[in-house]
Image: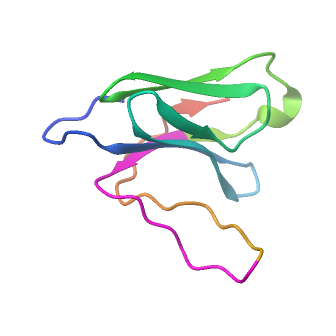
Amino acid sequence: MFLEGTSNPYLYWYRQLPGGQIHMLAYSVSIGQVDNTGPSHFSTSRTKDKEFLLNINGLLANDTGVYYCAWSHTLRQVCAAPGQKLPLLPIHWPVCPSLVV
């Protein structure tokens, strides 16, 4: 993903399953700081301000979906009931999918 007019964006990777559900796979608050929340064979790296790479090691049949990279100026999270973790929600979605598997 290439970004213009912003610096130090929060970056996210999401996957939309064939049934329509969207799950966050990873997010990054800055260069070198990433949190992977997806399957263990997914990894991410961020070595540049506006570059957030998603690597899938050993693609599986259940990895099928539409993958989106998104960004925001701030980190936002929906309030959840105690013990329930909801995905972080970005503000800016891409017009097109980043990758379809």
Residue 72 point in image, percent of width and height: 34, 53
89 w.r.t. 5: above or below:
below
Identify the residue at horizontal 81%, vertical 16% (top origin).
Answer: 58
Q: Which residues are magenta?
A: 68-82
* Colour option used: rainbow
From the viewer's side, name the closer residue of 42 and 8.
8
In the image, 39: left or right of 97?
right
In the image, 23: left or right of 41?
left
Q: Let me know if residue 73 is in the magenta part.
A: yes
Identify the residue at horizontal 78%, vertical 37% (top origin).
Answer: 39
19 w.r.t. 59: above or below:
below
User: Where on the picture, by quarter, is residue 63?
Assistant: top right
In the image, 88: left or right of 59?
left
Q: Let me know if residue 26 is in the magenta part.
A: no
Residue sitting farthest toward the bottom: 81
User: Where on the picture, by quarter, is residue 31?
Assistant: top left
Identify the residue at horizontal 54%, vertical 74% (top origin).
Answer: 78
Q: Report the quarter where the C terminus lies.
A: top right
By secondary structure, the bulk of the magenta-drawn segment is best described as: loop
Residue sitting farthest toward the right: 61
77 w.r.t. 75: above or below:
below
